[in-house]
Image: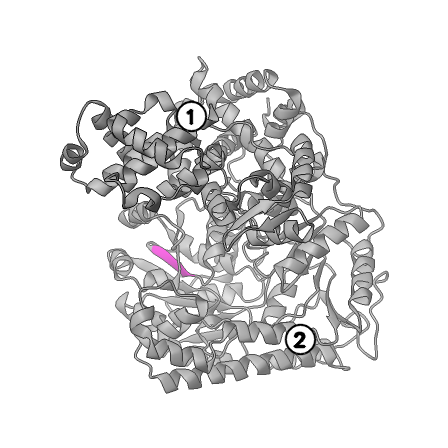
Amino acid sequence: MNKDLLLLLLSSTQPRRIKLIQNLLNGKRTVSTLFWAMRYDLLQYSAIFKTYDLNSINGAIKKLIADGLAKQVDEFQYQLTSKGQIKKDSVKESFYILQNTSYQYDYDVNEFKSRLLLAIQSVSEYSYQNKNYYPVKTDMKSAMIVKRWFIQNKKEIVNRLEDYLTKYLSQVDDKKADIIAQQMIGHDVYGMTNSQLADILGISNVEAYFMEYDGWVDFINYIINDDDNLLLPLINDVRTLKMNHHAIQTYKQFVTGNTLDQIAKNLKVKISTIREHLLEMAIWLPENKFPYFKIINSDDERTLSKAFGNQPIDDWQYRQISESTDINFFEFRIYQILRSKQDVK
Amino acid sequence: MLSDEELKKHLKKWFGFDDFRSGQKEVIQLILDDNDTLGVLPTGTGKTLIYQYVGKMVDGMVIVVSPLISLMQDQVDRMRYLGEKQTVAITSNLSWVDRKRVIKNLNNYKYVYVSPEMLSNSDVLDAFKQYKISLFVIDEAHCINQWGPDFRPEYLNLKDIIIRLNHPTTLMLTATASNDVVLDIKEKIGLPNLKTIKYSTNRPNIALAVDTFTSNEDKNDQLLYLVNKLMKPGIIYFSSKKVANAVCEWLKEKTNLNVEVYHADLDADSRYRIQHQFISDRIDIICATSAFGMGIDKDNIRFVIHYHMPANLESYVQEMGRAGRDGKQSISVILYREKDEILQYRFIDDTIPSEDMINFFYDHYQQLKNNELDDKANLINYYFQNGFTKNEVINIFEGRRNELITSLNQMLGYVRTKGCKREFLLSYFNETFSEHDENCCNGDATQLQLEQMDLVQESKSLNSRPRNVKWQSIIQTLFSK
């Protein structure tokens, strides 16, 4: 992993688990991963490296420690030194980190990119009347989507696609437009790899990946909102909700007044699963969208508030109250999420 | 039987060539006469053309068993590129849904590439049984040979599979098989009337060189000298991805050539681009591990340099054989630093399960069976599942280790020989050679003269890759009006 990036993901005031950060970036979505990602204020980076090989995070942390920028707090957690914090402030100024983050959607940038490149390539080769070429690698589903798209739009396709791409690229910043165009593949055009792009821009591979990623997300959103539907079939399933759809189902039943037991019965799942769903929804949603007080009543709130007072939220332990109250772990965690959201405000 | 003239007429019509390369015609004739055939043909012969040609002559499906899953998709892409759109690969890389879909629609395909593991799956085999199979091809047939360098236990199942498919005409192809290996293949595949066509392994247009050094610095100096001087494009092979990356970066710094790495760590997107930039002469030099080049068809590669010596002569012949497919003068150089073989000894230890491991596996099978197994454990598991006892397996791997060490020693013998390199190499494949001359190899008696051999390139780079192209001009090149 790029050590500047790791520096940006660590903190000088909060010990952080690097394994958890890695899981988060790779797209792991357990409640525990999501909860701590929220605590680290890194939730928006969930799954951004689903298809990008990060290399070892251990190697990167070793380098940071060797440079005196980070220290190990316990077996799993690391924290920046004050020297590390100064370095982080300066890296922040120059390092390109992903801009298009979202709490709402996952973008399957890889899938979109391979579909769009295949579409451009097939039209480009068609315009040169060449049938023998090596198509861009995609899975079968994407290949089929593009094939169907091509057949349906064959008439005038060359002009239409060229116009579409020109129209889109002329309304984004020139530098960004160049990056997107440099990815394109077509007749005798093979574009640039991630590291070739990084070389030319004089940046790290991961920054080049972020720039490209931002470019594709912009493009996806443009296609969704544009009046011309030419490329709309290509983004099928490319943008999906971050929240698990089972969790959304649970949430919907919960806000309409069902108890946890009723929901468990309706959906034929265990009550512990229902709790997990609600925790996940509470983490993803803004404070005002989640009915916290349907889970914790005012007595519970008073008890919890008194028990934890001004203690830092990261340090709260359920066992501090498990003996003395009848508040369960689920309620405790929900309150912890609520307080986290209030803290951020 | 078709006459030579008719065969050539089809060759011209389908492939645009005037004449066959050595061995192609003989093998095609044997297959068309329904003979099971083993073709030992040198690298660069165009083995794909053989089964593609036969496929065009006969009804029914051509199955191609191929060992390397990562390269199978490359082969499929190549077949499609050559116009055979009804080609598909069934491998573990396919998603479950895609695999189901392909198997259900098997009759849509003429050429089906499949891994031996997949064919051992009864669903897949049953699906094939529904169709007429006119040719069953075993690519890289030396993998059947238990003591061959690329031994794959799954290849041993092929004997049964051929029987269960009602014995379609079978074609086995390899570039590297000594007489012993040929005998072993024949025994293991169990086809009594197998005909063998064996052509010389020699590639006369590839000069052979080995340069020996005592330090890495000297080796790097020579590498730098060679890549600047030699005609491009070329490939540099490494045994380690890490070293490939480092040397690539170093060459980028020290030269103004377009140099790129290519190995298993690259994502599919980069792999595609680099392959095609290389094929279209936009890259001068590829720093690769052995994965590169098997699927690509590029005939103007002028040099293959081995930064690390290969593990055996078979691999060496395969890798250096990527040079000079156009028949023009080319060169293979091994850069050997004394004790380089230590790396290869380490690879042997990394791939062969030790006695301790085998003992542990057999004693703890119940606990291990639900875990994800690594490569070595998978290998032990194969024998376990096939009913081998612990001691048998220990003996098998002991034998295998010795065999790998013997192969490595033969490779070292080639590197160190003071005599004619080509004679040494060919004698390993049971051939004699006595036409050594000044363009043959560098040894004690002769030194290759690159200038006189037309292997020197004055200009710097093939085709400088345009940097900083504006998006408007990219869009303009993409679409022809």
Count of marks overlaid on the render: 2
Residue B205 vs residue A125, the one in the foreground: A125
**Who's the residue at 62% across and 36% down the image?**
A208
**Who's the residue at 85% across and 66% down the image?**
B449
Find the magenta span and give its range. B61-65
Which residue is label 2 attached to? B341
On the image, the x and y values in percent for residue A75 come to 50, 55
Give the residue type that dot 2 points to: Glu
Q: Residue B62 colored magenta? A: yes
Residue B156 vs residue B270, the one in the foreground: B270
Eyeballing the image, is A220 above or below B182? Answer: above
Which residue is label 1 attached to? A342
Chain to which the residue tagged by mark 1 belongs: A
Q: Secondary structure at mark 2?
A: helix
Q: Locate residue A234: give its quadrant.
A: top left
Residue B281 vs residue B18, the one in the foreground: B281
